[in-house]
Image (cartoon, rainbow, N blue to C red):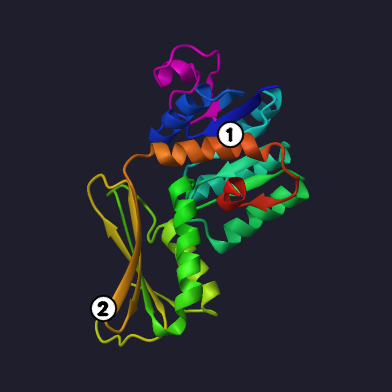
Amino acid sequence: MAVRAALVGACGRMGTLIIRRILATEGMEVSAAFDLVNIGKDIGEVVGVGALGVPVSDPKNLAEVLKSSKTDVLIDFTVAAATAVNAPIAAGAGVNLIIGTTGLSAEQKTSITDAIIRNNVAAVISSNYSIGVGVFFKLIKNAASYLGDEYDVEIIEAHHNQKKDAPSGTAKTAAEIISKEMGGKDFVYGREGVCPRGKEIGIHAIRGGDIVGDHTVMFIGNSERIEIRHQAHSREIFVGGAVMAAKWVVSQKKGVVYEMSDVLA
């Protein structure tokens, strides 16, 4: 049986790429599509792959459409406010989740997690679905475990000028990984005025043009510096990981929230 995958934000840039990747992935098919535009139109025609017989539905009808389409997994790469509403509804409909939305508050994350556990579905929630970023996280974790407090840590991220949240979810995840390895650190987001450096992790955001996503972690000691960097050249790297996770998650233990590192293990 093919994995039946639905998508919120299906008509956007990421949505279009994900739809195309699902269709090119053996053992997967598009079951439903949701967006605030093109409602009623065939999603295949909207994204330029030909008619699929799957109309774009209004997110207001999320639960009803997910159930009637027998969807196995819902992929959501939208915005925090929408994901915070849609994810619990999908979980309540018995649908597994792939969430790539960044900028979720602690309260929103808790609400989504509670819904996943309460409704006994499985989910992957990750700030970045790139396979390369998964390796990047492993490298910075290892570096942090070796270097310790003798090295200052700075994180610099750069994204396109349309990204709404800052710093990126990937930068925050990187900081959390390093902080855990180093016994707990405060985070400082940018610096201005008189601000002598302590033992914090500095996090800095750059926004401009069409940068897909760059992340650099600097471990800075006396007389030397180690930099670990990941650069995304295309959104395709996130698409591939998300679809891989969607196919993976449906066969995993329910009532559990997984990370991309679990998918890649």
Instruction: Bin the neighbour count of mark 1 within 10 Å (Cα to Cα): few under 14, some 14-19, many 20 and up.
Output: few
**Residue to which mark 2 is pinned:** 192
Residue 56 is one of the magenta-drawn residues: yes
Q: In which quarter of the image is residue 192?
A: bottom left
State which mark lies toward you, 2 or 1. Answer: 2
Of 3 and 138, which appears nearest the observer? Answer: 138
Q: Which region is colored magenta?
A: 33-59
Of 65 and 180, which appears nearest the observer? Answer: 180
Q: Is residue 24 visible?
A: yes
Q: Is residue 208 above or below residue 179?
A: above
Q: In this view, does 180 lie above or below 112?
A: below
Q: Is residue 82 above or below residue 74?
A: below
Label for residue 60? 1
Three-letter amino acid code at the position of disc 2: Glu
Query: Residue drawn at (65%, 45%), measured in percent from left and top?
Result: 123
Residue 162 coordinates in the image, percent (x, y) = 31, 47
Screen quadrant of the N terminus: top right
Q: Using residue 251 as the reference point, say whether residue 224 is left or right of it.
A: left
